[in-house]
Amino acid sequence: MRKRKGFTLIELLVVIAIIGLLSTLAVVSLNSARQKSRDAKRVTDIKQIQTALELYHGDEEAYPTAASGANLGEGTNMCLDDANGFIGTCTGSVYMARVPHDPEPTAQHYVYTSAAGTTYSIAFSLEGKVGDLEGDCVAAPGGDISCS
């Protein structure tokens, strides 16, 4: 009798199936971690914008006006200064040199609204849950964030 060395076809197929199953589980776990990371960044971005707006309000005694809603972090809303509020390029005293934007390029934006300058709202959406925050959220003066 000859002794055969190596693996049978069945053994190889079982190993390939196990590797496929493990890689699928890893990808699902990685996507969940990416979602949580983007949501955490969104909340952090909003908190930073709120801090800059409170500093602006302390000096200017009003919030920058944007009655129709401005997409923060893009176009003409890249910077926050004392001369123009949200603007593309800062020219005065800078409160936020680079206003952050949503980490997901195809997602909704951070939408800033302030009609009279006495209050403001920043609308944004979360993909999952961060603490007690979930879904469509609105940030307001004083660091308040509420979600529906």
Image (spheres, rainbow, N blue to C red):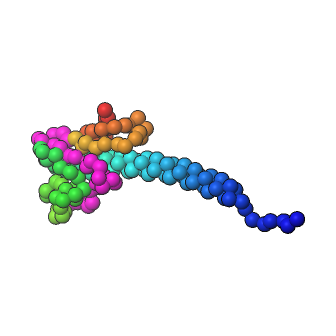
Left or right, 134 with reference to 80: right
Q: Is residue 40 left or right of residue 85?
A: right
Q: Is residue 122 magenta?
A: no
Using the image as rendered, state which of residue 82 and residue 28 is in the foreground. Answer: 28
Q: Which quadrant does the C terminus fall into?
A: top left
Is residue 26 or residue 18 the one in the foreground? 18
Q: Position of residue 1 (x, y in %)?
A: 88, 65
Residue 89, image x, y percentages: 18, 64
Where does residue 125 sit, x and y in percent of width and height? 31, 42
The residue stretch that appears in magenta = 93-120
- Residue 61 in view here: no
Residue sitting nearer the eye, 92 or 138: 138
Q: Name the residue at 65% across, 53% down.
A: 14
The extreme front residue here reads 1
Task: Identify the residue at horizontal 18%, vertical 39% (top origin).
Answer: 119
Outermost residue to the right: 1
Q: Is residue 97 visible?
A: yes
Identified at 75% across, 65% down, the residue is 6
Give the prevailing secondary structure in the magenta stretch: loop
Q: Is residue 95 magenta?
A: yes
Q: Is residue 115 left or right of residue 144?
A: left
Compared with 59, 131 (above or below) is above
Residue farthest toward the top in the current orientation of the protein: 148
